[in-house]
Amino acid sequence: MFMRHRYNGCLELLLEHISHESYQIKESALCALMQFASMEGKFPLQDLDWSEHYSFPRELIQAVVERLLSQEEDMALLISRFQEYLDMEDVRYYVMSSVRENVGRVMDKTKGVSPARTNVCLTYCVIVCPLVHFTAKHEDWKAAKLKEHKRTFERLWLGFLKYKLPSSMYKKVLVILHDSILPHISNPTVMIDFLTAAYDVGGAISLLALNGLFVLIHQHNLDYPDFYKKLYSLLEPSVFHVKYRARFFHLANLFLSSTHLPVYLVAAFAKRLSRLALTAPPAVLLMVLPFICNLIRRHPACRVLIHRPKACDDPYLMEEEDPSQCHALESSLWEIQTLQKHYHPDVATAAMAINKPLSQQEDAISELLELSTYELMERDLKHKQSKTVPLEFDPATQLLQGSGGVGVLGLNFSLE
Amino acid sequence: MGKPPKKKNLADKVRKTKTSTEIKNNPFEVKINRKKFDILGRKSKHDVGLPGVSRSKAINKRKETLLKEYKTKDKANKFIDKRFGEYDTKMDPEEKILQRFSMERQRTQDKKDMYNLNEEEELTHYGQSLSEMEKLNDMVDSDDDADEKGVLSAELTASHFGGGGLLRRKTQGEKDNGGNQRAKSRQELIEELILKSKQEKRERQNQKEESQVLTEKLDQDWKSIQGLLAHKNAPKADRLEEEDKPKLDEYDMMVRELGFEMKAQPSEKMKTPEEVAREERERLQKLEADRLRRMMGDVVEDCTKTQAHMSADDLNDGFILDGDEKPTLAYQVRDQAGSALSGKGPGRLCLVGEGTKLDGKWNINEEGAKIEGDDEEEGGEGESGEEESGGEEGSGEDSHSDLDSEQESEGGEEEVEEEEKDEEEKDEVPATKSQLSEEERKAQAEAAKTELPYTFKAPESYSDLKGLLQGHPADHQCIILARTQKCNHPSLAVGNKLKLQKLFGFLLEYVGELASRSPPELSTIDKIIPQLYGLCQLFPEAASKAMQTTLVDSAHRMEEVLEVKGRAAFPQLDMLIYLKITALLFPTSDFRHPVTTPALLYISQALTKCPVMSLEDVTSGLVLCCLAVEYISFSKRFCPELINFLLGVLHLAVQDKTSTGYSVVPPFRQNGKVSDLLVLSDPESSQTWSKKTLPLSATQTLTLTTDLDTDHYRLSAVATCMDLLKHCSSLYRELTSYSHIFQPITTLLSKHLPIKTYPAALQDLHGEILATISGSLTSRPLLVFQKKKPIPLKLFTPKIVEVLDYGKKRGNTKEEREKERLNHKYKKEFKGALREIRKDTRFLAREKLNEVMGRDAERKRKVKELFGSLATQEGEWKALKRRKNSRH
């Protein structure tokens, strides 16, 4: 009995230490606690009568989780440390159930962005368990059943997503949604509401929601009305500058790869993309130009966009939301012709492709998706090393002297 | 058996007597090869044959070769007839005999002395006939000996060898004159004679020495002026040569030298200003065409032309770009006349050193001569090497004399002087010989008041360079750099090229440091620019590499920051300066250029990724925009980032940001806390604003104390922005999507910008831009594919293959056909050879048979003879016996 008391006292001390300032102490406290938990599992404190069942120190884990979801400070590092233990499925199961109980409490109490919410979010992100390699060894035990696991997981997420999330968390969730959450939910269609809501938000969140939607449409037969219209309206000048542009264009490529799309739609996409390309940086242009060419290749009826023997003005309406109303099919891609005068040689060369009838082979754009300007620059530097370097023949005499045509810098700035 | 050959022989005889036409016309001689088919176009050589002729020919040939061999078979010895013309078949025997006879007669006639038995032989010594040697003995002797001999022969010989008559006559004359004078004894006379001759001899010797001294002097004189005359006055030199004639070897040498020297070449005449202008224009046109070609990027990989471009460049400013190949004299760099003389070898370098000492002409001459002598002593090099060195030496001297005269004419030219001193100090040779030039130099040294040292070691590291330049005003830094460059010119030493290449990198670094000081020392940078340009022209590869490294480093840093934060700060001022220098050193209009393309990418990266947080950022961004405009202004390439950024900057000046008809592109936000940066705080402040240029240092730190100042600064920024827009709007006039590109800007300018509150100058600019944009109605050309070359129709005309050998198997490969041909040939030859051998054996057998028959016939004849004689003997004996019997 005395030992029991000492043991409990020790546990409490350790639990307090989890909220200590120093990370080392926190970490060792956590490790010690988990060690205790595992020992407790093997040698239960009470002599249980159902000895055939496995026992688990549920209270201990619950206490640990409570501390981890502390409301005062950021536990990010500790949570990532805690992740190691989540590889064990029994631990994971009980952590999930205890988190579910806690989340409502935490979310209700705090408003706005707080460390608590981040903690919660992180925890969720961490519990993206690889449920696949489940052992069928302990069939009779609740914590080891795949179905149980899945159900807990689903309930956990649904409980979480009920709450209004700040945009950063929103993005985080959406990023992992399609490959970490959706496959593990027993009935993924429950996520439809969440995703459609996210898709309607607009901007970057919409871009991210696309991925989840795609999974639903593709695998779960979701019928989404005006999907392409929505996609069309997502094409904004900023789409070329956001962080998730690679993901977006990867998906857009997927969506538009169907050959059963109506011609007007494809034409509208091509025209809008090329119009937007007028504001795009070179790295993106290198990706967008083959993208447009691929569209035209897939839909030979769109060839009129780059080959129209009779003259016409540009009837395209940039402001029109509906791709069917924007008269893209009556227009031509003069923007690409403009880009033939782009300052970067590779872009100019890529834009030259429309001068000739397009080849049958589609351009592979997958490696172009992630291209950054810096990589482009490095590629340029590698491009020619051994050639002689042409030099400026006008002798330079001063700093602000004009080069090429006019000395704009000298006109507007002074050496001060 | 004996008959057929005899018959044939007869036939041969007959044939020989007949002419060839007779034979051909004789139907009995001609055999006609009957042809089965007449094939068109085939010429047959063998339709008519003359078997008799060919047989007799073959037999004759065998007789001459095979038979002879057969006859000499098993015989080791043979006779060779050495009589005249014995084996000459072309000679008639009579003629032969005649010739032999005449030769015999000649031999007997040649004998002069009947009794000289050894007349035919000639005694020789070392391959020369002794008699000849005896004859020419005198000639071999030295000329002064000959002289003495000649003189002596007049008097001495006369007296020595019975020249008594003369002596007597003399004495007689004296007697006649003197009368009372005692006749000198013979002894006295002889002594007098000897004395006289000795005196004469001494005199002659003196004279000779004198003349030698004179010639030597002349020689030296010649050498001294040779330097001056060698190049220009060839005829004069010729005259001098005549004087120098006696010393043959030197003369030879000189003639050779002069022969190979550039003989009074017409130097390039002074060009008239028009010519110069025209040439300049042509050069520029060529360069411009080159630039355009590179801009179009159609032949990007053409290296040779760019090389030409560079060499065209160096003609202009006297720099030799490919310094490694043609090391030049240091002076030629500034020698605007452009007579770039080049040479190598120790002789030239030595001369440079000496020449700069201003030791005077004599010294140089000796030096030159010494080198020459050395060359000759080395000997083995052969003629050409010698002459080459001579020629180079000449040119070197020439250059020196040019320089000399130049210096004398415009005595105050400091730099030349300084350089000379540089060189002098480097060589550390005391210049004491030429008084005049030293005085001059002293005077000029006083005139040049700079106290800078004249030589600089090329800095080995960046800190070296910094130490070198620190603490000097900008002008001095420039001079230091220039001198460093000259002292370490690639032609002076092997390692200098590398040093100077490094110097470019260090200088770039130094520029960066100057720019990042606060306040930035931009005027110093301004002064350094020509140096950078010069170095860049010398070493394009190294310069481009250094520039690339700088750019990549900076871009890499920016990229790292971007990956972490998603945004980056604007590049510092040093980077802006680097970008500007890039534009100055390298052509910005090329389709693809190893330096300028990455630089432009860097600018675009900065313009898209760096958010504008302050007025400093606005300034940096505007500088970048200016640079972008400069980069693309010649090639008129489209740069979307530029337009985006300008739009964003103008957006900063818009007051009401709620409902705009346009959307700004990142890094700008539609509305946010820093999106009012350029909105005027007080509209009244525009009254006092006047257009002035923004300082470059404002990209780093901007100290604006009052609101008024800030507002003025804002207005300046907006003005700069509008100016850039104006440039852009005129640059991109030809783009097909012109209106779409400028559509947001038009909307912003016309609807949202608070133009009413701006000063008049800005309003004018505003109106101008709008007019430009709206004034250019872009025509939309048809967007059609380029016309493809029509694929030619398939033609069905028969394929014609030239068949060269009829009746042969065709369609094989070339090798097979060749092999077949060779096989066929071999078979033919084999058969022919076999036939020949058969004929040979047949011939031999026949000969043998003939021989045997001949021998048999002989034997038969002899036996018959014997029988006959025996029979007669028998008969006689019988008759005798009968007679005896009858007698009895």
Image (spheres, coloured by chain):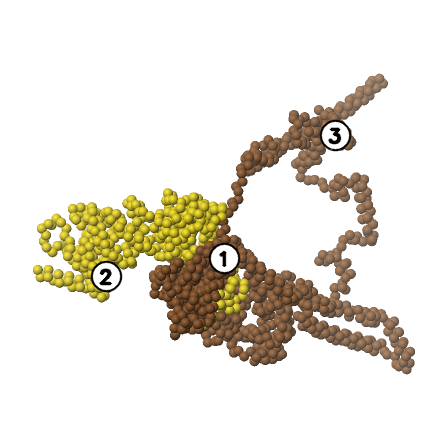
Chain colours: A yellow, B brown
Per the image, the residue denoted by label 1 is B776
B716 horizontally vs B40: left or right: left
**Could you give the CA–CA distance between mark 3 and mark 1, rounded to whole angstroms?**
100 Å
Viewer-proximal residue among A75 and B491: A75
Letter of the chain that mark 2 sits on in the rendering: A
| Location of residue B3 by image quarter | top right
* Image-quadrant location for residue B831: top right
Q: Which quadrant: the N terminus of chain A?
A: bottom left
x and y percent of residue B758 in the render? 43, 68
Q: How far apart, in angstroms, are the residues tagged by discs 1 and 2?
A: 56 Å
Circle 3 sits on which residue?
B24
Q: Is residue B651 above or below residue A91?
A: below
Contact (CB < 8 A) between labels 3 and 1?
no
Q: Which-is-in-front pick, marks 3 and 2?
A: 2
Q: Identify the secondary structure beneath mark 2.
A: loop
What chain does badge 3 belong to? Answer: B
Q: In which quarter of the image is residue B183?
A: bottom right
Give, as a three-letter code, the residue at label 3. Lys
Question: Residue at label 2?
Answer: A111
